[in-house]
Amino acid sequence: MPREVEISIIEREFIQNALQEGIRRDGREFDAFRPLELNFGDEYGVADVQLGKTRVIVRISVDVVAPPPERKFDGVFQIVTEFSPMASPAFEVGRPTDAEVILSRVLEKAIRRSNALDTESLCIIAGLKCFALRADVHIVDHDGGLIDASCIAVMAALQHFRRPDVIVEGEKATVLSTRERDPIPLSILHQPLSVTFSYYEEGNLFLVDADLAEEQVRQGEIIITMNRHGEICQVNKYGGAPVEPLDLLNLNNVALQKVKDISKFIQQKLDEDAKKRDAGGLMAELSAENAR
Amino acid sequence: MTTAGKIVNNEIHLQSIHHQQTQPHQLHPPEHSDGEPETKKQEMPLDTSTYSLALLRLDGRRWNELRRIHAQINTQAAADGSSYLEMGNTKVLCTVTGPAEGRQAGQRGAKDNEAKVEVEIGFAGFSGLERRKRKSDKRTLEMQHTLSTAYSSLLLTHLYPHSTITLTLHILSQDGSMLAACINASTLALIDAGIPMSDYLVACTAASSATTSDSDNSDPLLDLNNLEEQELPFLTVGTLGRSDKVSVLICESRVRMERMESMLAVGIDGCKRMREILDGVVKEYGKRFS
Amino acid sequence: MAALVTVVLPGDEIPRSSLPTPTGKKKTLTLGPGLRHIPPDTITTTIAGALTTDNKKNAIWVDTNSGRYIPAVGDLVIATIQNSVFESFNCLLTPNTPFASLPQLAFEGATRKTRPVLAPHSLVYARVVSNGQHTSPEITCVDPSTGKSEGLGPLKSGMIFNVSLGMARRLLLKSKGEVIVLELIGAKVGFEITVGRNGIVHVDGANVKTILAVGRAIQEVDEQALGEKGQKKLAERVLKSL
C-alpha cells in the first residue's frame, strides 16, 4: 500500500530546532510564500502555477448542456481535482486520500460556494440551455501548499478563460465559434484566494506556505480563504493543537495582505498575457489596412 | 443596542448587560424530558419587556441563548461508550468502539505507533426535511475528517499503539449546528468509553446577523438552527476545556473579516456554557456510582 | 574526469577508439553498468549517460544521473528505519520500495542481550551486503571482518538533504568528485558530512545555520551543475552569510 513516506526523526527535530531559532529550511521569512510562477497556455483558460516545487495545472473547458431543473437560471460549474501518481508515488488513481477530499472540498467552498463565478451569466436559455463550465485541477508535482497553489491556479484560469459567444433567437441558440466572434470573458464577482498557515510550538509559531517537510512536522493547519476586499470566504481549522483566538484574528490580517499581493500578481500576469495576445490583434489589422 | 463581542488579550468580553439573565438552556433531568415532544423550544420565555421584538430570533431566542440541550451518556449497551445529544431539533447518537484492533489488516493504527481515530457519520433517511438517501458525500467526508483530526490530537493515542478507535455517529434529526452537535456527542461518548484525553472538546456555532454587508449594527448570534444557518454567515468553533483556545474552527460562508471577532467571541462563550452543560451530564451520570 | 565527455544513447555502438587503453596488469576489459557485449566484439549501450573509462582498471561504464537507486553490494547508504520485526529492522533506502532488512545484531557490540533500540523513522548509515535479486536487500552497520562499526551506525543529529544519484557518487569519489565547494567552506567552518549512495547527504555541524548552508550548497552544485568557478563563487557567498 503506497503511503506518504514519513519524515525521519532527524529531519523533524532539525526543522523544529531551526524554527525555534527563526530559520526556515529554505531561508524564507515565516510569512513568505515560495517563489510563485504563473504561466498561461496558448488556449484560453489554461493556467500553470508553480509554487516552489509544487506545480498545479488547471484547465477550464466549456460545454452546452440542459440546466438542472431545480436551477433553471443558472449555469453549471464544477471543479474536479485529480491527484495523479505523477505528483507523488503515494497517490493512487481512483482512491481519494483525505488530502484530496479536503482539497476538493476547500476549492468547492472557496470558489464555488462563495460565488466567485457568476453562474447566472452562464445561462443561455432559461431551463433549456446553459454553459457547463468545468475546471480540471491537476496536481503535477507535490511539495506542499497544494491548496494555496490550486486556488491560485483555478482563479487565474477562470479569469483567463473566454467562453464562446451565443446568439439567441427565441428558443434557438447558436454558439459562435471564436473565429466568427471574439469569445467573452467570464463574469467573475470576486477573487477568493487561500492562504494556509501551519503552526508549531503549541500555536506560538505560524508559517505561511509550508513545504512538504514542514507540513509533515506541523501541529496543525489553518486554511483561510478571502478576497482582496477583506471578505472571508472560508476558514478551516480541522482539529490539531489549539490556538489562541486572538492569533486566529491576527492571521486574518496576514492572509489579507498575502491575498492582495497574489491578486496583484495574477492581474499583472493576465495583463502581460493580454498584451502578448494583442500583439497581432487590432493594431496589426489597422496597419494592414493602412498599407492597402 | 450593539452587542459586539471583543477579544482583548485573549480574554473574551461580551459587551452586554443581558448576559447573566436567566438561561433557558438549563439541563432538564433525563427522566423528565425523555419522551418529550419537540415543541419544547417554542416554550422559551419571550422576554418582551426588555427586548424589542426585533431583537428576538425566529424561534424566540435572544442573541446569546443556546437552544435546549439535552444529553445522555451510556445509552447503548453494546458499545464501549455512547451518548445521545439534542441541540434543539438536532439529534445525534454517538457510539465509540475501541481502542481495539482495526478491521483491515495492515492498516491498524496510525503512524508512529499511535491509535487511529476513525469516524463514520450516517444520516438517517428521516433526519432532514426531505426524505433523501444521503450517500457519503464530500461534506460528510469533511466532517469525518474534522472529527478524526480533532480527536487524534486530543486523545492520548500513543497509549494504544496499533489500534483503532471508531466513532460512529448517527444523525437522527438535522436542524443546524450539525458539526457542533457531532463534536459534543463524540466528546460525551469518548468520556463514557473512558478513553484518556488531555482535555475535552466542546463546540458551538455562532453567526453574524448582518445581512447587508455595510451595516455596522450586527449582533452576533449563538447556536443556530437550520433556517438561520441558511440565511446568515456562521462559523462552528470548538474549544478545548476551560481555556479559550480554539481547536476546531470551520467557517463556510462569506463574511467580512471584521465580523469574525464578535462571532468568535460569542462562539467561544457558547462553548463555555456548553461545557458546563456537558459537565453536568457526566456528573449526573457519575452520581450513580457514588 | 576527462574533459571530453561522450554522451551515449541506448543502442549506440561503442567505437573501438573509445575503449580504455589498459595500463594496468589487467588485460580483460571490464564492462560496467549500462553496457552490453554482443559477441564477437560489439559493445552497445543500454542506457543514456556519459561514457566513462578507467585505463588503470581497464574498465568502461556509463554514468547516469537519474533514476531510482538500485542497491549494489558494498554501497554505503543512508537508510530509514520503518519498524522492527523479529530479529531485524525494516528499512527504506528509497521511498515507496520494498524494505531492506537490517539485522539487529549487525551493529557494533550488539549481542542477543544488548540489541540496539532504534525508533521508527530514525536514520542509519549502513553498507549493502546483498543486493537482493530475489529477496529483499540486506544492509549492515558493522564490518563483518573486524566487528567494528567503521563509521557506520545510527545518525543522531544534523539534517539530511536529497541530492541526485550522480551527485552522491561524485561526493563519494574521494578526489575526482570535483566538488571543491565543500573544501572551500570546510577551510573556514567545521562540519561533517555523510553521503549515502541512495542520494541522501547527511550534514552535521555546530549550528543550524552551518548545516543548512552546507546542505544547500551541495544541492545547489547538484541542481545547477556548477563548475569550478561557480562553486568558488558559491563558497564565497556561503561563507559571507555565516
Image: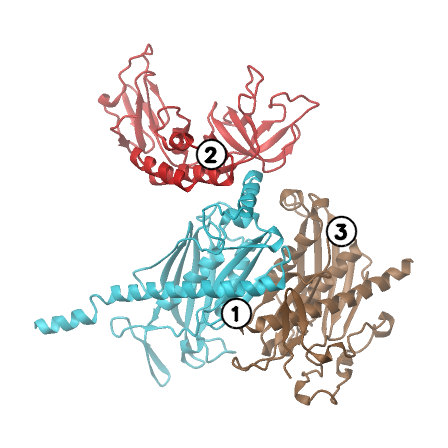
Chain colours: A cyan, B brown, C red
Relative to B89, C173 lies left or right: left
**Above or below — where is B191 with respect to B172?**
above
Check disc 3 and give the amino acid type. Answer: Pro
Q: Residue furthest top?
A: C25
> What residue is at 38 percent from the left and 65 percent from the top?
A264
Q: Residues within 10 Å of mark 3 (few under 14, many from 20)?
A: some
Between A205 and A50, the one lying in front of the other is: A205
Q: Mark 1 — residue?
A: A232
**Residue B46 placement: quadrant:** bottom right
Q: Which mark is residue C201?
A: 2
Check disc 2 and give the amino acid type. Answer: Val
Give residue B100's position: percent from left, percent from top.
73, 47
Q: Which mark is residue B247?
A: none
Q: Secondary structure at mark 2?
A: strand
Image quadrant holding the C terminus of chain B, namely: bottom right
- The answer to whether dots 3 and 1 both sit on one chain is no
Relative to A239, A263 lies left or right: left
- What is the chain letter for disc 3? B
Q: Secondary structure at mark 1?
A: strand
Of badges 3 and 2, nearer the viewer stands 2
Check disc 1 and give the amino acid type. Answer: Ile
- What is the chain letter for disc 1? A
Q: Mark 3 — residue?
A: B196
Q: Is residue C160 visible?
A: yes
Q: What's the distance in space between the residues labelled 3 and 2, CA to CA?
A: 41 Å
Give residue A215's position: percent from left, percent from top.
53, 50
Give residue B27's position: percent from left, percent from top.
81, 72
Q: Residues within 10 Å of mark 1 (few under 14, many from 20)?
A: many
